[in-house]
Amino acid sequence: MLEGDLVISNLSEIKNHLLKMIDRQGPVKITLKNVDRLDVSFVQLLIAFKKAADNGRPLRIDLEDSEYINNWFALAGLDKKIFN
């Protein structure tokens, strides 16, 4: 689960966490929940992670159905389905 500030200032830490997930065996599930802040750099990292991990093993990215996340994606002009 990723939560809190998912922004460029935390990107290195988030990237290291995601890389550890790739090394594990089996399906990968990422849940965004209780997000305080989100920015484009994080979304780009998540898209790159999805492409890197997409080697035939199950990868699931769940976005909490919160007002903040829904508004952020709407204002950015992005569909939350980009992670499906």
Image: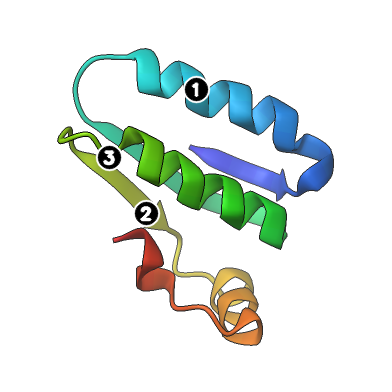
Q: Amino acid at mark 2?
A: Asp
The quarter in which the C terminus is drawn is bottom left
Say which residue label 3 marks: 54
Q: How many marks?
A: 3
Horizontal and vertical percent for residue 57?
17, 32
Horizontal and vertical percent for residue 79?
44, 78
Q: Amino acid at mark 3?
A: Asp
| N-terminal label among 2 and 1 | 1
| N-terminal label among 3 and 1 | 1
Q: Secondary structure at mark 2?
A: strand
Mark toward the viewer: 3 or 1: 3
Horizontal and vertical percent for residue 11?
72, 37
Relative side of 21 to 74, left or right = left
Classify mark 3: residues with Cα within 10 Å, few (<14), some (14-19) or many (20+). Answer: few
The quadrant where residue 15 appears = top right
Horizontal and vertical percent for residue 31?
43, 46
* For residue 5, above or below residue 20: below
CB atoms of marks 2 and 3 within 8 Å:
no
* For residue 61, above or below residue 80: above
Classify mark 2: residues with Cα within 10 Å, few (<14), some (14-19) or many (20+). Answer: some
Q: Secondary structure at mark 1?
A: helix
Say which residue label 1 marks: 19
